[in-house]
Amino acid sequence: MNGRDLFPDYQPKTSPDTVHDYLRDPDSKVFKILNDIKPPSLKNLKNILGYFNKYIIEVEQNPGTYKSGNIALGADLDQYYPSEEEILVSELGNSIKTIFESSSIQEIEDFKKEEGISSQTLKFNEIRYRHVDAMGSGRFFYAEKNEREIIISL
């Protein structure tokens, strides 16, 4: 008997794990803000920066935490649980990073001048997501904090 016989309805997850998998509350402020800035583009940069600068301050007041994880369900021994603010800063920072990667330096400089955006250095820790299929128990999503800061010079 193989695993397919024991769990005939099992479907492996083939898409990347994202914040949408991890957070289950559709009314979360994370989703409200992410919907407000869609799609991440140069024309939305000022709005994204405004949110980023607001929530980077709030992360200091409401950081995530490590708790004992349920190893049998695929969690780490000390599992990280990010705050909504940390998740937002990570998502917003990654949006800014995407904008920078898809725009030329000249386009960014022109936009900064047009919108009155001052030069600044952005620092954040990326939150990554992963899932574990615990046969007989279900699919579980976990977050991991990259301890190495991402730095963007704007």
Image (spheres, rainbow, N blue to C red):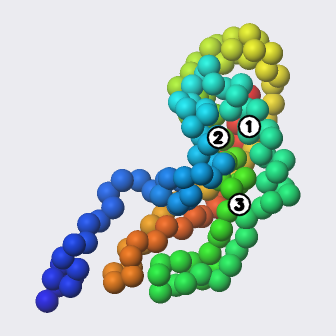
**Residue 26 versus residue 103: which sits nearer the camera?**
26
Give the secondary structure at mark 1.
Answer: helix
Q: Nearer the viewer, mark 1 or mark 2?
A: 2
Could you give the CA–CA distance between mark 3 and mark 2, rounded to whole angstroms?
Answer: 15 Å
**Proximity of marks 1 and 2: CB atoms separated by less than 8 Å:** yes
Left or right: where does residue 51 sit relative to residue 134?
right
- Which residue occupies 60% across, 28% down? 100
Residue position marked by numbered label 2 in the rendering: 33
At x 66%, y 48%, the residue is 29
Three-letter residue code for mark 3: Ser
Of callouts 1 and 2, the N-terminal one: 2
- Report the residue marked by disc 3: 83
What x and y, as percent, mark residue 153? Answer: 74, 32
Residue at position x 78%, y 61% in the image? 63
Task: Please report the residue visible at 54 percent of the width from the left and 52 percent of the height from the top.
Answer: 26
Callout 2: 10 Å neighbours few (<14), some, many (20+)?
Answer: some
Q: Which disc, if any, is residue 115?
A: none
Relative to residue 145, is residue 114 depicted above or below?
above
Which quadrant holds the N terminus?
bottom left
Task: State the image quarter where residue 78 is shown.
Answer: bottom right
Q: Which callout, 3 or 2, points to the residue nearer the camera?
A: 2
